[in-house]
Image (spheres, helix red, strand yellow):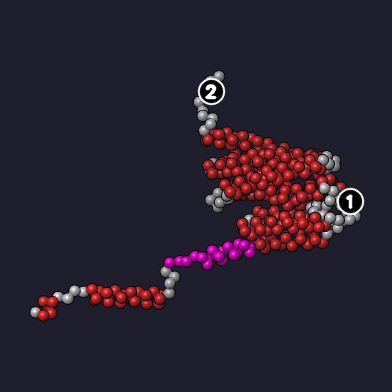
Amino acid sequence: MEALPIDMSHPAVRDYLSLVRLQVLTPLSLLINIATVIVCSVVVDPSIGRISKLYPTVISPRPSAIAVYVVALFAAQIGYCILLVLAGKPQTKKTLIKGSGFSLVLSNWVMALWAITWTLKWFLVSTILQGILLLLLLYSNVVLLIYHPPTSKRPFDTMLIHAPMRFFLILQIGLMFPLSLFVTLGLVQTPTAPGPPIDPNAYQWPGFGVVFGTNILGLLVVVFRRDIVWCVAATWICVSIWSLRPKPAPVYLTAILFTAFHPLGLLASMIYSQVYKRSRISLPGDEHPGLRSSSSGNNGNQNHREDRAAREVDEEAVWG
């Protein structure tokens, strides 16, 4: 069979083939991820939620709040897949291929494997998978931010590429990786069925450090970048943590405070940006009219004096 008359090394051909692969692999990985999470949450015993109750920690969230978060994440990824198929702008295709690309495919596969290992109580393996997932999402978000930043000229790129990837990343940074690490290190409370843990204040200071550290990082991002997605996601995670009680006072109060700090920081940053931007605008013609007329009068008198000084004298007309 003769070779196809196509230069496979050409960048445009390689990008086209990469896009076709992503159009197949991304929906497939998302479908496997959704199916695995549903099976491990509903069918398998013990389920993901049951394992969380058997190994409670000071940062354990309310399961219903995180379930809604994950459903929103999957819905955003469905929109991502639709954009992947319908993308027409070259910039959008480049962002999909070079920005998120295969990192999202691998992230969905890793999350599906994590769900399986979590229900099997392979906590060390699940923590390693969470670490890999965090690195994949951190890499893709950094690439998107540096080489394919969001722009108002392509709002669908911001809503369906940047927002889902950031939403995914914040879940790992703010909750899933620290929670899995706590269980692996044995920083768990003594559960009671079906009541609260016997020792709700155990390991409160490591929990405080995690909640404070992740949220202060998120607050800096929200304030300096005016990041609405990060604000919503971080606030959501804080609500899910303090809504499941009892919680130690340092963890409970910190989560409540940052629930308010994130939206207030975003609002203050937006107001400051608008005020600072207006203060730097200087419109032409804003000079005081009295100063302008006085200046123009002085310039006119000076020019008149210069004309008189430079005028030549006709000697014949003076002396006859």
The answer to which of 19 and 208 lies nearer the viewer is 208
Q: Is most of the magenta stretch helix, strand or loop?
A: helix
- Give the percent coordinates (x, y) of residue 73: 69, 47
Q: Tag 1: Cα neighbours inside 10 Å, few (<14), some, or many (≥20)?
A: some
Relative to residue 257, is residue 29 depicted above or below? above
Q: Residue tagged by mark 2? A: 3
Can see residue 239?
no
- Give the percent coordinates (x, y) of residue 88: 54, 41
Amino acid type indicated by mark 1: Pro
Q: Tag 2: Cα neighbours inside 10 Å, few (<14), some, or many (≥20)?
A: few
Who's the residue at 90% across and 55% down the image?
A: 198
The stretch in magenta equals 266-284
| In the image: residue 286, left or right of residue 41 | left
The answer to which of 100 and 131 lies nearer the viewer is 131
Q: Residue tagged by mark 1? A: 191
Who's the residue at 56% across and 41% down the image?
A: 93
Where, quadrant-wise, is the C terminus in this rendering? Answer: bottom left
Asked if residue 283 is among those painted magenta in the image, a careful observer would answer: yes
Who's the residue at 14% across and 75% down the image?
A: 314
Sequence-earlier tag: 1 or 2: 2
Amino acid type indicated by mark 2: Ala
Point out the residue furthest to the top here: 1
Where, quadrant-wise, is the N terminus in this rendering? Answer: top right
Element type where label 1 sits in the image: loop
Question: How far separated are the C-alphas under marks 1 and 2?
Answer: 65 Å
Element type where label 2 sits in the image: loop
